[in-house]
Image (cartoon, coloured by chain):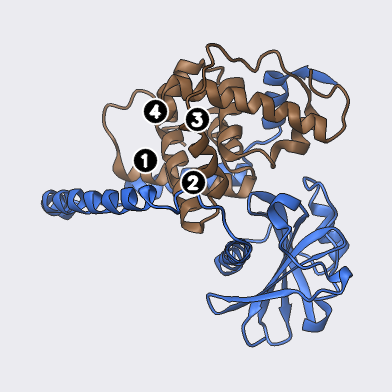
Amino acid sequence: MTFLDKDTLNQLYRFGIALTGNEQDSQDVLHTAIERFLRNKPQKINQQAAYIRTIMRNYWYDELRKLKTHRDHVEASQFEQEIISIHSQSLEDIMIDQQELQKHWSSLQDSQRELLYLHCVLEYTAQEISDELNCPRGTVLARIHRLKKHLEKMAQTNGSQGALS
Amino acid sequence: MKKPINQSVNDLLNNFELSDEQLASFAQLEKDCLQSKPQTKQVNINHSKMWLSLVASFLVMGLFMGQFLGAGANKKLTSDEQLHAIAMEVSYNHLKFKPLEVAHSNLSQVTGYFNRLDFNPLASSQVAALSTSLIGGRYCSIQGNIAAQLRMEDNQGRISTLFESRYQAQDFSMLPNIEQGQEPKVLYVDGQRVALWVEKGLVMALVSEANQ
């Protein structure tokens, strides 16, 4: 591939897995995003990968809405309208076993997996995530806060002592 | 071994890589897109389309605001609505007919492929009546929960799909449990017959032709 190298494609593929939760949908979403990108041939794009991630995200959520299985995401978004006072949130102090993470991976919401990707793989700050997702920084911090709680709750429910600390 | 979450997420995702075949398909896609002619005719009508889109957007926004301000804005789905949503989802997946990830007529061979599931896909007592033979399977999801779909074919070439997922009370409590003597819930969606039930701790959904 001439315009995207193998590493970038693999990064986008992994982002797709984080977004959709599985390999097949990731491939479909990436395929559609690249096709749309190439057909539109947008000019003055400095961050091609970020632009393609946005196409992938929009396409995936559109597909979910069509399927009407976007209920969880919509409900979660409604909570985000609440004003939550969080000044600083970070996931960095969470310790987790990879097996444990893999076990709970599919039960996380799409937006939570996406947040993990942006925060843990791309090492984006809350501000950078808010820029990419085009939402307020406070919302990102609130999401991180809830994700942290969620991961802790999952570990407790599972009875796995000390899986998260 | 416990690791910082950043490392665990990286390690988990680094297990996934595009195969040479998949990379080749993206290279082909690029070639196809670059060879196709630009759609110049559309430019002339874009202006009027833009105005139409603008008017449509206002209408949709008006409708949305009306609904949002109404009583049903935060309404939880009823059991029937949840059943219908599940039936719609599995029917859509059945009709979409995505490529099989594993093709085999032997159940243990097919279930052996699903190593990312947190349950073991099983043969169901409800499927035996259809006289079908297994042709393969692939991963999918039901209401956001990872699931296996097993594709079957009868002797007349009619395809049916059995979906299996782990039982999660918050998503599937409305489904009948056949081990408690309950009958599967049957719905008709998009011309398909969709049977839904819980069996051996798994959620099962069988989609077949309405007259099968």
* Secondary structure under the numbered disc 2 in the rendered image: helix
Q: Nearer the viewer, mark 3 or mark 2?
A: 2
First in residue order: circle 3 vs circle 1? 3
Spot the brown chain and give its letter: A
Which residue position holds label 2?
Answer: A60
Frontmost residue, B212 versus B112: B212
Q: Residues within 10 Å of mark 3 (few under 14, many from 20)?
A: few
Left or right? Give the position of B122 relative to A109.
right
Give the percent coordinates (x, y) of residue B147.
72, 54
Q: Amino acid at mark 1?
A: Phe
First in residue order: circle 3 vs circle 2? 3
Q: Amino acid at mark 2?
A: Trp
Instruction: Tell me how far mark 2 sits from mark 4, CA to CA.
Output: 16 Å
* Secondary structure under the numbered disc 3 in the rendered image: loop
Identify the residue at the far front of this view. B71
Q: Residue at left 43%, top 26%?
A: A132
Frontmost residue, B167 versus A24: B167
What colour has chain B? blue
First in residue order: circle 2 vs circle 4? 2
Which residue position holds label 1?
Answer: A37
Give the percent coordinates (x, y) of residue B36.
31, 52
* Secondary structure under the numbered disc 1 in the rendered image: helix
Instruction: Tell me how far mark 3 sits from mark 1, CA to CA.
Output: 15 Å
Instruction: Tell me how far mark 2 sits from mark 1, CA to CA.
Output: 15 Å
Instruction: Tell me how far mark 4 sits from mark 3, CA to CA.
Output: 27 Å
Q: Amino acid at mark 4?
A: Asn
Q: Amino acid at mark 3?
A: Asp
First in residue order: circle 4 vs circle 1? 1
Q: Nearer the viewer, mark 3 or mark 1?
A: 1
- Quadrant for residue B161, please give it: bottom right
Frontmost residue, B24 versus B135: B135
